[in-house]
Image (cartoon, rainbow, N blue to C red):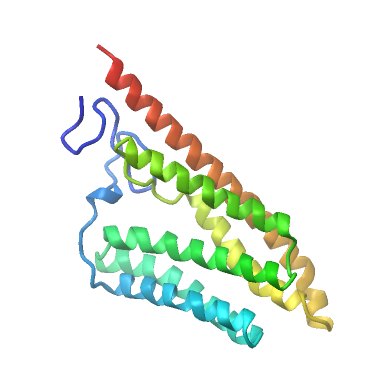
Amino acid sequence: MTATDGRPGGVPSRGATGTYGPGTAVSRDELGDRVFTVPNALSVLRLLGVPLFLWLLLGPHADGWAVVVLAVSGVTDWADGKLARALGQSSKLGALLDPAADRLYIVATLVAFVLRDVVPLWVVAVLIGRELVLGVTLLILRRAGWPPLQVHYLGKAATFLLLYAFPLLLLADSDGPVATVARPVAYALTTWGGALYVLAGVLYVVQAVGLIRGARFARDAP
C-alpha cells in the first residue's frame, strides 16, 4: 500500500529538517519547481568556481586566488539559503544544487591536496569513502521510493569547518610566521570537521535504513 504522494503507506512524511514525523515542515519534494531564482544562480556560480579552484591549485599554484574563490564560495553558500527563505524562492533544484556544490568543493580540494602532499592520503580516503557510501545510500533510497534526505545540521557544520580549514591548510603548507600560526588551527578545524563529516554520514545512513525498514514493516503489516 502506498500513500497518495508515492511514499510507502503507514510511513510519516519528512520535514524540511530531514527528519520524519508529524511536523508541518515542507519536504524537499514539496518545494517549488522554479529554476531561475537568485539562490539557484548563486549555487550555479559556486559550481562554476570548482574547476577554476582546481586549476588555481594545480596549475599556477596560485594559492591566494584559490583562497579567494573558496571564500566567495563560502559567502554564496551562506547567502543562497538566506535569500531562498527571505524571498520565498526555495526550490527542488536549489535543494539539490546546494549540497552538490559543497561536496564538489570538498572532493576537489581533497584531490588537489593529495596531489600536492598537503594532507595524507588516508584522510582523503576516509572523506571520499563517506561520499561513496552516501551515494549508494541515495540510490537505495530512490529504489525504495524515497526522495533524498535533507542535509543534516551536523553535515552543514562539518562543511563549514572544512571549508574554513582548507585555506588555512594552504597557509600552513608554506614557510614563515603566518604558517606557524595557521598550522595548529588548520589541523584542529580539519580534525573536527572531518569527524563531524563522517558522523553526519553515519547518521544519514542510519536514518535511511530506518526509513526503509519502516516502509517494509508497514507494507507487510495486515
Frontmost residue, 42 versus 129: 129
From the viewer's perspective, tell me whether residue 5 is left or right of residue 161: left
Give the residue at x 75% y 70%: 117
From the viewer's perspective, tell me whether residue 182 is left or right of residue 70: right
Q: Position of residue 132 (x, y in %)?
A: 53, 49
Where is residue 99, by image quadrant? Answer: bottom left
Q: Is residue 11 above or below residue 137?
A: above
Give the residue at x 36% y 36%: 20
From the viewer's perspective, tell me whether residue 172 is left or right of residue 152: right
Q: Position of residue 1 (x, y in %)?
A: 20, 24
Asked if one can make out residue 19 in the rendered structure from this viewpoint, the answer is no
Frontmost residue, 202 versus 12: 202
Give the residue at x 29% y 74%: 38
Asked if one can make out residue 113 in the rendered structure from this viewpoint, the answer is yes
Frontmost residue, 38 versus 111: 111
Name the residue at the top extreme. 222
Where is residue 185, by image quadrant? Answer: bottom right
Q: Is residue 2 above or below residue 176?
A: above
Q: Position of residue 195 (x, y in %)?
A: 65, 50
